[in-house]
Amino acid sequence: FLPHLIASMEQVEETYVMVKPDGVQRGLVGEVISRFEKKGFKLTALKLFQCPKELAEYSRALQGSQVQVILPQTDQLHYLWSRCVYGTLGYCVLAKAWEGVGAVASARKLIGATNPLQAEPGTIRGDLAVQMGRNVVHGSDSPENGKREIGEVFDALMSIIELNSAQNISGLRK
Ligand code: UDP
């Protein structure tokens, strides 16, 4: 009875997961999504997109830079994202939200440590990756960032992508 009561008091959270360009290129989208599905999370939105040029260029500028970049709070997510696409214009898959009890911490456990060499076998990075700069997947690191990433990053990226597509379409029409 008590464990059930405690479980029902635990919060249903939303987290945000992205299969990074290396994961998409290696054909690991199904594998990654499957691990979250099997765990029991509910998937609420999924989108395949090509990394926006602006983000790829920003990311490339940061690559190899050992300098600690100090950014205003509002740019933190942009910075995080740019670290996630490794300067490529590759495709990413955004899983907008996975819902479940303790989803954020649980997703991070499924994903494993940032450096795949330290990630436990059984985790996504432990099983499927070798390098930190090719670690297959991103997941929110706190419920607050989960909310922000779902709201700000997903929606902001979608609008950049839609803008780019609109420009491409008008460019094609000229
Ligand atoms: N990263 C890297 N080298 C580093 C630190 C981070 O290549 O020294 C990349 C790595 O792909 C990581 C991403 O930047 O997944 C974001 O870093 P963070 O510290 O947020 O790790 P995560 O939350 O992804 O485990």
Image (tube, grey):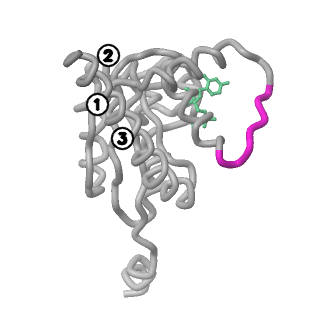
How far is disc 2 from disc 3 in space, using C-alphas? 21 Å
Q: Position of residue 114 (x, y in %)?
A: 57, 32
Q: In the rendered structure, which segment of residues is drawn in magenta?
A: 68-74
Position in image of residue 70 (x %, y %): 78, 35
Lower position in the chain sequence, tag 3 or tag 1: 3
Q: Quadrant of the C terminus?
A: top left
Give the left or right position of residue 30, taking residue 58 as reference.
left
Is residue 135 placed above or below 139 in the rendered structure? Answer: above
Name the mark on residue 90. Answer: none
Looking at the rendered structure, the kind of residue marked 2 is: Gln
For the point 51% across and 24% down, the residue is 54
* Label 1 to label 2: alpha-carbon separation: 26 Å
Considering only order in the chain, which callout, 2 or 1, is on the residue closer to the N terminus?
2
Q: Position of residue 151 (x, y in %)?
A: 45, 55
Q: Within the image, what quadrant is residue 75 found in?
A: top right
Real-space CA distance between mark 3 and mark 1, rounded to the nearest whole angstrom? 12 Å
Label 3 belongs to which residue? Answer: 158
Secondary structure category for the residue under label 3: helix
Contact flag, marks 3 and 1 (Cβ < 8 Å): no
Side of 167 where 11 appears, left or right: right
Which residue does the numbered mark 2 point to in the structure image?
A: 25
